[in-house]
Image: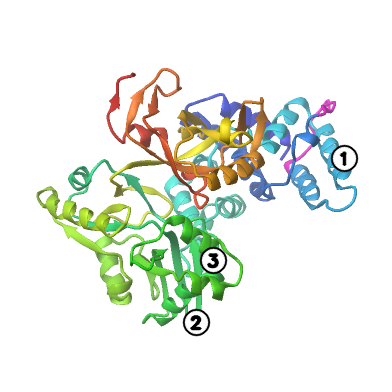
Amino acid sequence: MLLATLARASREIASTSARSRKTALLAELFRSAGPDDVPIVIPYLSGRLPQGRVGTGWSVLREPVAPAAEPALTVRDVDAALTAFAAVAGAGAQAERLRVVRELMGAATEEEQKFLFGLLTGEVRQGALDALAAEGLAAAADVPAADVRRAVMLSGSLVAVGQALLAEGPAALAEFRLEVGRAVPPMLAQPGQSVGAAVGKLGACAVEEKLDGIRVQVHRDGERVRVFTRTLDDITDRVPELTSVAAGLDGDRFILDGEVIAFGPDGRPLPFQDIAGRVGSRLDVAAAREALPLSPVFFDILALGGEVLLDLPYRERYERFGRLVPEPMRVRRTVVAGPDDTARAEEFLARTLERGHEGAVLKSLDAAYQAGRRGASWLKVKPVHTLDLVVLAAEWGHGRRTGKLSNLHLGARRPDGSFAMLGKTFKGLTDVMLDWQTQRLRELATGDNGQVVTVRPELVVEIAYDGLQRSTRYPEGVTLRFARVVRYREDKPAAEADTVATVLATGPVRAEE
């Protein structure tokens, strides 16, 4: 595929807000793509590079290059050039990187140059996120979008599904099945306003402790155990506690969903940051385990024996789950019959908070497991409103914060994949967080006017706030009241940050003050 075809499609997708039109444009693009183009085209549509961060800073992009008169560059040519760029190291690396980029830009037309510049600086923002790309693939192959989404869910790879679908046709979708040993994205919970409102919406449901730990998916296939995070990273070697627990269960083929947490000497749960530090460490695992032992807590099961359980109602999954996992390793829960039983749910939440946990997750007893989806049948309730938002920019600090990036510009996802700014905050930041975010945001920087540093929207931060307020200063007409930083969520990609719709659904909007 010519890069010009992709660049033109990207521009047209960016110029329309209609989901149906975006899908039609994507379908047209995929019909003209070959299977070998898919691993490049899909990441490029979402502004990602298959190579990851290749280090194309302003120093290699600031000098303009005369564009080519006619399009001849293919997407695979670009991919090869960027792979070569990423491999450059050693003496003379800067000069060689500059040569590679200038040669690439010189082979591109003016429109292609604009697309490449945006791609290399993280500024491709046409809203062609994976969900839309899946719908475009479905339309291109004339198959139901739900079938493509399910194949992506089970494989964990839109690229793999797209390649197979374009190469082999609709029959290829049947090849994608849940497999023990291959991680799938976990089901997520939507924010709920209160326990009463959640029970009113769900009816009969389980009310479970909401733990402030690291989400894990544990796979056992015979003697082999693997452990994955919510972002599908394999952390098996870093969590020997989980591998030994899984090996000791009375079953030799299963997939469990849960979290790992840790407790202090007083028996209360330790902060997320402590657990993340332990799980993220690749040093001396034995010493780390002794310093901070982890405790697994499981709450769902995706497969058992030769049976895939995803489509079963939660009440049936839990029955099988209970037969495999001993009670001490299951999340605390109670079951309520419906709105008339709300007092039981309120009491459970109160006891959960007393034990030092975050809140509660309410789960419909009739719900299937929607891997990779923030399903409406799981609702999380916390005593304090929190949102996972994306850092769009940060301001240089003053006084004791001089030289540090302090005031954060916060954004929520729009349906088209762009971000709407909801406000700013510098509250809640410790000195350690200030040092860390200054370094991290400078790595993501796309511009600096001396006051504000704009960044690629990749870093997710959890924000506590006291409610919503009308504001004409921000594009969605609302802002967050008394926003403050709780923690950074490096375990969560920007594509999983909260949406504008989620923000607006969290409660009433106060009048502008």
Name the residue: 54% across, 69% down.
238
Q: Amino acid at mark 2?
A: Glu
| Front tag of 1 and 3 | 3
Q: Relative to residue 81, is residue 209 drawn left or right? A: left
Q: Secondary structure at mark 2?
A: loop
Q: Amino acid at mark 3?
A: Ile
Name the residue: 81% across, 49% down.
84
The circle drawn on residue 223 is 2
- Identify the residue at the far front of this view: 400
Q: Secondary structure at mark 3?
A: loop
Q: Which residues are magenta?
A: 63-75
Other residues around mark 1 within 10 Å, as few (<14) / some (14–19) / many (≥20): some
- Image quarter hosting the C terminus: top left
Asked whether the viewer can see residue 368, the reply is yes
Other residues around mark 2 within 10 Å, as few (<14) / some (14–19) / many (≥20): few
In this view, the residue in front, 165 or 293, is: 293
Assess whether mark 3 and mark 1 are in contact (beta carbons under 8 angstroms).
no
Asked whether the viewer can see residue 138, the reply is no
| Front tag of 2 and 3 | 3
In this view, the residue in front, 304 or 374, is: 374
In this view, the residue in front, 44 or 190, is: 190
What separation in Å lies between label 1 and label 2 (alpha carbons)? 51 Å
The circle drawn on residue 99 is 1
Q: Amino acid at mark 1?
A: Arg
Q: Secondary structure at mark 1?
A: helix
Q: Relative to residue 463, is residue 208 drawn left or right? A: left
What separation in Å lies between label 2 and label 3 (alpha carbons)? 17 Å
Q: Earlier in the sequence, mark 1 or mark 3?
A: 1
Q: Is residue 494 above or below residue 305?
A: above
Q: According to the image, label 3 marks what residue? A: 235
Q: Relative to residue 143, is residue 29 drawn left or right? A: right
